[in-house]
Amino acid sequence: MKLLQPSTATTIRPVLGFLAAILVCLQTQSLARGQATKPAASYQHGVVIRLQGPITPMLEQFLLRKLEAAKKQNADLLVVEIDSPGGFLDSSLNMAERLRDLRWARTVAFISREALSGAAITALACDDIVMTPLARLGDAGPIMQGEDSLFRHAPEKIRSELVGRLRDLGKAKGRPPALAAAMADMDLVVYRVRNKQTGEEDFLADEDIANAANPADWEKLQAVPESRPKYFLSVNGERAVQLRLAQAVADNLEDVRERYGVQREFTILQATPVDTAVTILNWPVITGLLFVVGLVALYIEFSAPGVGMGGLIAGLCFALFFWSRFLGGTADWLEVILFAAGLVFLAMEVFVIPGFGVAGLTGVLLVFVSVLMASQHFVFPRTALQLNTSLQSVLVLATSGLVFLGAAAVLSRYFRLLPVVNSLMLETPDAYALAESSTGKDEKARTHDVFRRVPVQVGDWGLADSPLRPAGKARFGEHHVDVVADGVFVDKGKSIRVIEVSGNRVVVREVAEDA
């Protein structure tokens, strides 16, 4: 019996196969470490913007401000360092669109730990994605909070629109659109496929193959495990490189700098005092304090008409509120216009239209609506989470209003007795004359008496020294007194009579000359 000897080809074939497998493995590892996809160009000035924590309208505005700062510094490489679990969908999409359309620098998303949900959307909009080996990217399925405060998947209408936008982002930045879409579509299965004619490999879903020019040319090799049904696609750094979602992995920013050939150290755009001030002023407690101080100051100004300390303090408080909301991303000029219109209506009610009617109620409503709109990024709440945000804003406003009413009641009675306030007030010559005419008291006591009483009493007659609409000046003998008309306007020079004296508030009524 003759034994068959193996041929040389038969002996070498397994060895070649083993070497080829090793070569493929090494090539994959090299790709994952970023060595096979180094950028062709080097960059002169790199800037880092850190996006950390939940994505909110405030974080969106922070990014926009830092983008402008980076542009002014003539940066040609923009690294967005992301460590975020996601957040508001609208803000995430706005940030993604801004980064997608940025042309003055190359954008790199460096994911240090995680970029999930809305943060993944933001990362997909960058030209390159670089991740640490164990960082996570994906899981961008939109969720909404139900009436029972439990989170559920968003309706199909919202999901389908987001899937389409993720496909567009993937296509715009040269990433497999199907894999990008699978981050938000739990039912989408993506396959690694090969074109039988060209040998080209890609990642496509069934619908992509069906819509191809020649569907029969594409051969399914295997399903991407991360895109299995009922799961949103989520991958780590090395896997993201293998799926062409990311360009490389890097351990830290220094590795990123070396990869892009930046000679100088990165310029890191930190939070400035302005950013810190915006954050503090958006705290509910600080917002409530601003409103209490502003409303009390406004009350003082309306009680003593004229541009004085009360008006300046009120203007400062409301300006700080809207400024912080502008930079926080929840307010626009519409809210400011509504607020200003509300103040005009209130001023008309106090100085022009007697009583408290339509103008006053309209003014209060406009102020309330403008402040509420400026405190949230939506107009009408459509989810339980948005409803909770609105209720929190209403609670802050209601609490501020109650505190203001209490403060106003105290001020109306004891305003002129407050030492600090007294030192800020200018008295009329008549008051000083009364102080000088007092006898048997020292100067401090005489001044205290002037503050406690007015030189008129119920039943006194006088003349309107200015138009009373309803507040103005009146003359009673040698004394000029601040008065308020009761019910109707009083023209200058008309006869009036005091009908009520309450503290320093003198209420008068016009009387006929022959009465």
Image (cartoon, helix red, strand yellow):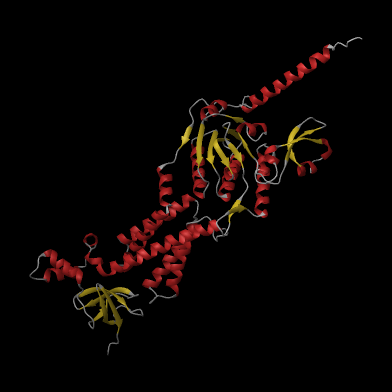
Residue most extreme to the top:
2
Above/below status of 500 relative to 14: below
Q: Is 379 drawn above or below residue 219 in the view shown?
A: below
Residue 176 located left or right of residue 371:
right
Q: Quadrant of residue 197?
A: top right
Residue 311, given in percent of the width and then of the height, sits at 34, 61
Look at 49% across and 26% down and name the residue there. 264
| Name of the residue lying farthest toward the right | 1
Left or right: 379 in relation to 501: right
Q: Nearer the viewer, residue 80 or 381?
A: 381
Residue toward you, 188 or 200? 188
- 83 shown above or below 24: below
Residue extending farthest to the front is: 1
> Which image quadrant: the C terminus?
bottom left
- Residue drawn at (15%, 71%) of the image: 434
Q: Residue furthest left?
A: 440
Q: Identify which residue is drawn at 78% across, 18% down.
A: 14
Quarter occupied by residue 448: bottom left
* Nearer to the camera, 13 or 455: 13
Residue 211 picture location, percent across and down? 79, 43
> At 44% across and 68% down in the image, what residue appears?
363
